[in-house]
Amino acid sequence: MSDGNFHTIEAKGVRATLDLRGGHVRVFAVTQDGREVEPLHTAPWIDDKTVVDDETIDANLRFLSGDFFCAPFSTSDIEVTTLHGWPANSPWKLVDVTAHPEGGQTARYELVRRVQGARLVKEFTVRDDHPFLYERHVFIGGEGDIPVANHAMTRFDGGGRLSFSPKRYGTTPATAIESDPSKGRSLLAYPARFTDLSRAPRADGGTADLTTYPFGSKHEDFLSLIEEPSNPLGWAAAVRPDKRDIFLSLKNPADFPITMMWFSNGGRDYQPWNGRHVGVLGLEEGRTYAGHGHKASIAPNPWSEAGIPTFLSLDPAGEVEVRNVLGGLALPEGWTRVASVEAGATELVLADEAGATLAVPYDASFLTRGA
């Protein structure tokens, strides 16, 4: 899938396709145990011309798929742009593709627009037999502070199980993301703070088990999980038994101290959603004051005052960057939920609740920058 709108890189057992129209990952596919795993979500309207050609709809919705980079994350209320900023809503151009010295490819793309005066480069790497997409976003120059995040999505056609690296607490924002019943519905309590992910407060007085998907039907909900800063590796794992796979999101907590969960399960009734965006879970790694927008993220706020970084500071004379890794693994027979994820120098080791382990090739130096 490489043409004017798409570009694909590949290595032995893995390939990734970027939609150049808005910087969304359209395909991330891993061949493992004799079959192909594709853990990312693509919106059901992606080939509907009435949506894709309607420029009154934000590009990040028209081309909604896989994973995309947000700068700023959420509301753009400083620089004039749209939801999630230019990186998620405007074209990217291919700069170059180079061979990885140990097998594989690295592609560099540049956003056609500037972000607060900065050039933004997206660097994707796939490596032979590594079931991962290594992502790096680099701001060159520019000025000011900006909240950033990656916006990865998976989908559950059947049920699924979720697990995470240790978190300090979870929290919902001040208001529900769908508070008008004529447009949609939310089920969680807003605002709320909790430490037990299996008992998140609901608006009806009950609780929701966030370690199981789904916890309800026909709802749209959003929350943030604050990473335990002592974690050497931040991770989120989604087990999809019907697809026989595991979706992984990996990060350095120093880059992205927040994991946001977006439950999009038929809870929006307006265009382009129309109740058909069902079973979707966003696992979004961020350096942001969640859904509060650009201004609130760079101003003093309860998280930043507690020592949780909520923005990235651009360097007019240099570069700043953030990194993350997406993974897709074949689900071993009998596995129910990922209990732990640990990185060695050259492999990532996952353990199941029952104690079984799975080791896959992994470049730990990518997130630690070789430290």
Image (cartoon, grey):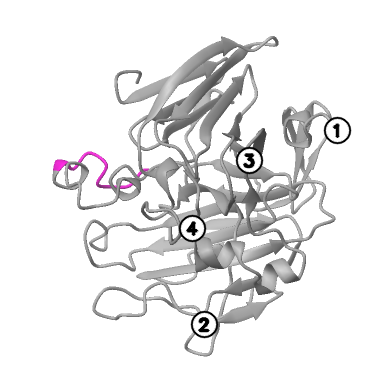
Residue 159: numbered disc: 4
- Mark 1 = which residue? 371
Mark 3, secondary structure of its residue: loop
Mark 4, secondary structure of its residue: loop
Label 2: few (<14), some (14–19) or many (≥20) C-alpha neighbours in 10 Å? many
- Mark 3 = which residue? 333
Q: Is residue 266 left or right of residue 347?
A: left
Residues rendered magenta in the picture:
42-49
Q: Amino acid at mark 1?
A: Ala
Task: Measuring from the top left, give residue 24's x and y in whole percent.
Answer: 41, 38
The Cα atoms of the two marked residues, 1 and 2, are separated by 41 Å
Regarding residue 15, the answer to whether it shows in the image is no
Who comes first in sequence, dot 2 or dot 3?
2
Q: Amino acid at mark 2?
A: Ala
Closer to the eye: label 4 or 2: 2
Closer to the eye: label 4 or 1: 1
Q: Is residue 318 left or right of residue 31?
A: right
Who comes first in sequence, dot 1 or dot 2?
2
Residue at x 36%, y 53% (from the top left corner):
82
The Cα atoms of the two marked residues, 4 and 3, are separated by 17 Å
The Cα atoms of the two marked residues, 3 and 1, are separated by 35 Å
Q: Is 227 rendered above or below residue 195?
A: above
Who comes first in sequence, dot 4 or dot 1?
4
Label 4: few (<14), some (14–19) or many (≥20) C-alpha neighbours in 10 Å? some
Closer to the eye: label 2 or 3: 2
Q: Are marks 4 and 1 in contact (CB under 8 Å)?
A: no
Residue at x 53%, y 30% (from the top left corner):
121
Regarding residue 190, the answer to whether it shows in the image is yes
